[in-house]
Image: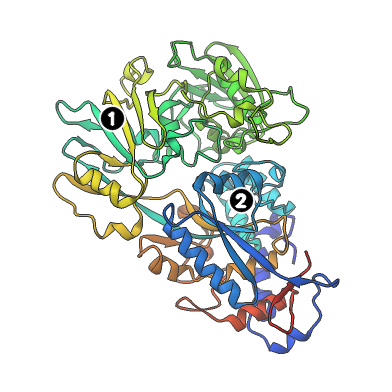
Amino acid sequence: MPLPASDTDARISRRAVLAGFATGGLVTTSGCVRRARSIVGRDDPDPLSLTITTVPDDVDRHAVVIADTLKDNLEAVGIDVSIDYRAVEEFYREVLINHGFDLFVGRLPDLSDPDDLYEALHSRFVDESGYQNPYGYANLAVDDLLERQRRTDGEERRAAVADLLEAVVVDQPFVPLAVPVEHRLVRTDRIDGWNGRDLTTRRGFLDLEPADGVDDLRAVVTDPRVTENFNPLSAAYRNQGLYVDLVYDSLALVDGDELRPWLAEGWAWSDDQDGTDADSLEEPTTGRTVTVTLRPDLTFHDGEPLTAADVAFTYRLVADTTLGAGSVRSPASRYRGRVSVIDALEVHDERTLTITTSAGREATARAFTVPILPAHVWEERTGTAQLTGVSVAQGTTEAVVTDNVPPVGSGPFRFVDVSERQSLSLERFDDHFSLRVDDLPAPTVETFSTHVEPRSPAAIEAVEGDSADVTIHPLESYTIDDVTETTDVELHTQPSRVRYLIGFNARRAPFANPNARRTVARLLDKSHLVDSVFGGHAEAVATPLTGEWVPDDLAFDGEDPAVPFFGTEGDLDAEAARDAFERAGYRYDPSGSLLVRR
């Protein structure tokens, strides 16, 4: 059943479809159906064989166990499955850049705002590489809902998001599984003030409270990619990008649920009555321009001034890293969705520019979180990439492939030195504007040193042994019960912005068919995964978003309300799942293998 195109009908789409499933669409049926001829592919279909792409056990044990469970359950319903383990940067490159997967199990970040779904699912991005629509998913009705949530604000936007989530759970372009609770270990004797902070953002490491005589914040990471590449635009090496946040500034500071002026002194919408409404992002807007005013005397780490021209350059570069000089556009693989709200830019002087947008305030303000790049460094990287012995796709630029070491930003910390896969050294940027503006959070240590440990147990030992103050990356859940908290060492807990999920490649059979995606979604027991894989340190979810955005009828309450598991307590009812595949239009050969025409 196709999703309705109109806003009026969108809210009933999931209920209508699910009602159809409940009366015979995806429930257990007689085995005689397997003798029926498939409506999907009548010309000699072949046994279906799939590959699950994920990362190795030493990178993400949770993802591996989920992939193993999915493999077992797919095989139980007649599908031949193999698992392709990729190093973490190879995993992101294969999924986000090359799109060379059938389905993947892993984590993707930044699904905290509805507009993240615009980037993830809108069909306008279907041929681009990066975080924008890696699934190859296209649904015009979903596009309409994505556009509506982007155009509106306040309660109108919340209603649009509810309609969008109703549509997404019907179509299951990917399967959200669980949101982990993130645990980090921190020392409070040397540095205090960790409580209530989001340690995935710049704000989490400003205004900390070092003890007397403590000038160095010592961090430990379990993912060495930050020592190998410092390109803010690289999807293969960046996920949440804390270190990019420390070295680069953005117009706005993410501070909890708020966006505060940062590089920007303020911004004013064209419909503001007094022209000074810098912080309000809640009220609907009828205007479509916002004028941004930068703080005075901004500089990059190399001493060059940071001006409005650098802001405009950054937005143009993210939209097209050839800056219009290439035969085809080459968008950046990160931040593309955030800057896609911008229709036009006008630089008035060194401190002022105007952004024209067709979006509402909330979606437009997300562009204010993009790291601002120095034009005098990056304008030389807009030409065709030249990699010795490597064939690159048409339109690939140096901006996309450079490792950007050493990085030149304007952030509160600047680059000092790096030893690949071993350590990274940053120091406080003493000319940073936050150090001269009284009401802004600022860096309180002189140096920020980081070393690499391979796994969570070694990272825990570093903090407990007083050679590190904080574990930057979340601890693996199996290690948490072994942590011993003392008066000097504490567990820091916060909800994650990442989602564990199953991602489908809609460019490949059978996953262009939403019926196949929905059926696969029902092969995993999300509640059981939370207990058995995450040890209870996660929340099972039915939608990509959480919290206030989720309508009551889509809240996960022990069972997924849209795609309930075929079975109980983790044990698959394979017969019910096989019947569901047949209801979806597929058939089996005499040996019990599921047949699909490629």
Label 1, residues with CA under 10 Å away: few <14, some 14-19, many ≥20: some
What's the residue type where badge 1 is placed? Asp
Please name the residue shown 19% across and 28% down the image: 214
User: Would you place residue 250 above or below residue 335 in this image?
Assistant: above
Position in image of residue 533 (x %, y %): 41, 65
User: Which residue is found at the position 75% from the left and 63% from the top?
Assistant: 2
Quadrant location of the C terminus in the rendered image: bottom right
Foreground pick, 95 / 431: 95
| Residue reaching furthest to the right | 43
Q: Is residue 242 visible?
A: yes
| Label pair 2/1, CB-CB below 8 angstroms | no
> Circle 1 — which element?
loop
- Marker disc for residue 207: 1
Marks 2/1: CA–CA distance:
37 Å
Residue 423 falls in which quadrant of the image? top left
- Please identify the residue farthest to the front as the structure is shown: 389
Where residue 116 appears, as percent x and y from the top left, is: 56, 45
The x and y percentages for residue 567 are 52, 79
- Sequence-wise, the earlier of marks 2 and 1 is 2
Q: Quickly name the residue at label 2.
A: 160
